[in-house]
Image: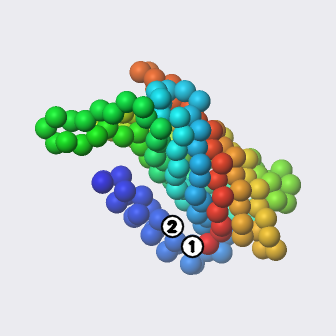
Amino acid sequence: MRHLILILFLITAVSGFSQFDKSISLRTTGNFNVALGGLGVDDAGVGFGLDASFLSKHRLQAIVETSLDHFFGDKSLYIDRITGKDAKTNIYSIKAGPQFFITRNLALSATYGPTWYKVRDFDYTRNYGFKYSITGFFGERKRFIAKVFMVNIPAQDRKIQYLGFAAGFTL
């Protein structure tokens, strides 16, 4: 719950700041994920992402990404005997890095930052991870976006990797 409050605070701060500076772009996406490794039998998931691009009128930009991903498809169910909660597979992250436009409508980005995850568990583990993205901007004012990305979390206990496809729009 603390992480959700922090993410909502960051969204409010970025959107409030973006009203004053026109070189900030805010984008929201919904995504579908496919696990490559480290998530056990949780093989697919859905998520939500929010990106803020700074210096958005330039070819090289700074980007801050937040994401919430939930994986499903678990064939085995773990339930806490005391609370009755079942173990989930969730991943929350805040990442930052460069975004470079190779054409007017196509950008590459590589971001790095903290990730909180639980993989068939009841408590979150924090680690740091990478996200590599190819983003396409479509429409008259480039308001619609499509993104293909790969997330890599090189944790000591398990190496988490998944691919995703996201679609959304610029706010």
Q: Tell me if I can see residue 42 in this picture.
A: yes
Eyeballing the image, is 100 above or below 161? below
Element on which disc 1 rests: helix
Query: Residue 161's spot in the image, x, y percent?
Result: 56, 32
Give 136 or 11, whichever is nearer the viewer. Answer: 136
Q: Are marks 1 and 2 in contact (CB under 8 Å)?
A: yes
Count all numbered tags in the image, as a single digit: 2
Q: Amino acid at mark 1?
A: Ser
Q: Quadrant of residue 144?
A: bottom right
Eyeballing the image, is 98 above or below 82? below
The disc label shown at residue 18, or none: 1
Is residue 96 found left or right of 11 in the rendered image?
right
Residue identified by numbered label 2: 14
Query: Residue 138's spot in the image, x, y percent?
Result: 79, 65
Query: Residue 75's spot in the image, x, y percent?
Result: 42, 31
> Which residue is at the far front?
75
Eyeballing the image, is 103 above or below 142? above
Is residue 156 found left or right of 79 in the rendered image?
right
Is residue 52 found left or right of 93 in the rendered image?
right
Q: Residue at x 51, y 30 (%)?
A: 160
Element on which disc 2 rests: helix
Per the model, the C-alpha gap separating discs 1 and 2 is 6 Å
Give 82 or 128, whichever is nearer the viewer. Answer: 82
Q: Amino acid at mark 2?
A: Val
